[in-house]
Amino acid sequence: MWSILLTGLLIFLARLTDVSMGTLRQIMIIRGQRKIGALIGFFEIIIWILAISRVLSNLNQFYNIIAFASGFAMGNYLGAVIEEKIALGYVFAYVVPKNSTANLSEELRKAGFGVTTVTGMGLEGPRPILHIVFKRKDTKQFLNLLKAHDKDAFYTILDVRAESGGYIRRTGIAKKK
């Protein structure tokens, strides 16, 4: 009985680990870090092979199949949580303020965000548009500032594949790249 439970637990933990690693591997590859992605993939597949071999060698033990599927499900969840916590890369925010831009631009700059303001043509005439590039880790602070100074602003946040030059917020202080 104990060996069945231990085997199931090991299968679950193996899947939890390899699926979480798979999420990180995909993110590294998408972000252009192919070598790190390949290295993660190497260990990911070793763990997967060990887990699947235990399941396939004992198909009559339904607990192993449940452990395998449960580890997969939880690995997806854990991978997403880990990815959110490490928040690799940069994002681009496109903001159309509802209120005056002077305050919002100024407050964002005081917080270390680089802001470029351009003018666009909206339904009601010329509208200011703010362009901001910053680390994904700073998204929460950015949104808090935005909502504190213009809760009705329209905004979108997009992933940035590559960036160069300008001002990028680093450790709370804007530095020229």
Image (cartoon, rainbow, N blue to C red):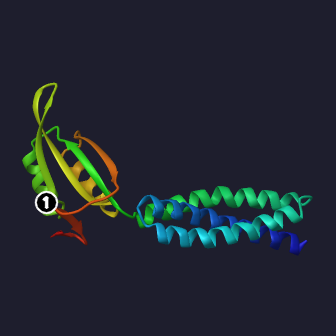
Residue at 82 percent of width and 71 percent of height: 7
Q: In what element is the residue under mark 1?
A: helix
Q: Which quarter of the figure is the C terminus placed in?
A: bottom left
117 relative to 112, above or below: above
Residue at 11 percent of width and 43 percent of height: 118
Nearer to us in this view, 18 or 154: 18
Nearer to us in this view, 55 or 110: 55
Nearer to us in this view, 40 or 151: 40
- Circle 1 crowding by C-alpha within 10 Å: few under 14, some 14–19, many from 20: some
Nearer to us in this view, 147 or 18: 18
127 relative to 94, above or below: above
Q: Which quarter of the figure is the N terminus placed in?
A: bottom right
Q: Position of residue 113 (x, y in %)?
A: 18, 60
173 relative to 144, above or below: below
Q: Position of residue 150 (x, y in %)?
A: 19, 44
Q: Position of residue 40 (x, y in %)?
A: 56, 71
Q: Position of residue 54 (x, y in %)?
A: 82, 68
Quick one: which residue is furthest to the left in this view? 102
**What amino acid is found at the position of numbered circle 1 in the picture?**
Arg
Label 1 belongs to which residue? Answer: 109
